[in-house]
Amino acid sequence: MSKKRIVVKIGSSSLTNECGEIDQKKLDEHVKAIAGLREANHEVILVSSGAVAAGFPKIGYSSRPVTVKGKQAAAAVGQSLLIQTYIAKFKEFNIIPAQILLTREDFASRERYQNGFATVTELLDRGILPIINENDTVAIEELTFGDNDMLSALVSGFIHADLLIMLTDINGLYNGNPRTNPDAERYDYLEDITEEMLKETDDRGSKVGTGGMKSKLQAAKTSLSLGVSVFIGQGRGKDKLLRILAGEGDGTYISNGSLQPINTKKQWIAIHSETSGKLFIDQGAEEAILYHGGSLLPAGVFKVEGRFNIGDVVEVYGLNGLLGKGEVSCSSEDVNRAINRRNGISDKSIIPSVEVIHRNRWVNVK
């Protein structure tokens, strides 16, 4: 099998016992399975939950805390316990882990996003195992990634993974709740996550985790949009990840060969950037950027809303609604001057002869 880049996401319920403490037997199995992938020459990035679940028994809580300060305090204790345990376990296989803690702001900031990509790439090049978790101790909205489900999807996209493996306590996706409906049938393969599936899915997490099946569906949908295939399900034994990679996993495979990977810069524009304005374009410009791979030129813009500068991201609207987003090569003042001159309004200032949005900095809305 050719070398693959794989993101493995392990949720709290797959790491801890019923008391909320780290289950050493479960952890040993996960470590051996990841080591098996590495021995088969695959690159692995581990997205691991479990910090809050591991920490709350140590600070005197009888069950998982419900307050933000309680969860963040538990995470502060549990994160160190979790990474210490990983370091000790992986040492047996001569694997060096590296801890990376992220928040939503790390994705929203262009500079931090690029730095994160560079760091993970360098670690992989050096043979290090990145272990990524949300920085729960400082997150403004606690656990905003949904038990790391969305975090694993975003990570799999920005490091251009071949597969995202989401290990959970249910063996895949069903057309009903298998715990309450004996007639529920599992989906073995899916090509898409539909809005109807999202509406009909419950998102209650377990007593030691926060991510229910809906958050996993949302994460899978995001991964697919970034060109990454997904597996959601269970696994047992030290070769479980190799079996999943070989298509023999106990769960649901979600893949669509028509979806292509999106480069890191376009991912940031599409998913994480904040927009500073709006451009309204004519039919000719719409056809050029949507169907012919063209850049957006000043001649195609007939209206500007908001104020933006070079390097800002704006939304672009056609005659029938939102078309996409892009990073502008000129300011709103420059575009307005071009519109005024085209409309016969005298303007002697110099108008830059550049694209408004270059095709390499443009993403369609769908």
Image (cartoon, rainbow, N blue to C red):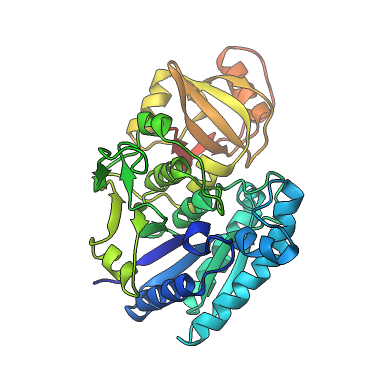
Give the percent coordinates (x, y) of residue 75. 68, 60
The one of 319 and 44 positioned closer to us in this rendering: 44
Residue at 65% from the left image edge and 28% from the top image edge: 332
Q: Residue pushed farthest top?
A: 344
Give the percent coordinates (x, y) of residue 81. 65, 72
Question: Is residue 236 shown above or below 69?
Answer: below
- Quadrant where the N terminus lies? bottom left
- Quadrant where the C terminus lies? top left
The reply to whether residue 277 is visible in this rendering is yes
The one of 178 and 32 positioned closer to us in this rendering: 178
Give the percent coordinates (x, y) of residue 161. 40, 60
Give the percent coordinates (x, y) of residue 271. 52, 42
- Number of numbered discs visible in the structure rendering: 0
The one of 168 and 46 positioned closer to us in this rendering: 168
Q: Quadrant of residue 348?
A: top right
Question: Is residue 19 shown above or below 356?
Answer: below
Residue at 39% from the left image edge and 64% from the top image edge: 6
Question: Is residue 242 shown above or below 311?
Answer: below
Q: Quadrant of residue 199?
A: top left
For residue 309, side relative to residue 300 (left or right): right
The reply to whether residue 11 is visible in this rendering is no
Q: Quadrant of residue 3?
A: bottom left
The one of 294 and 22 positioned closer to us in this rendering: 22
For residue 359, side relative to residue 117 (left or right): left
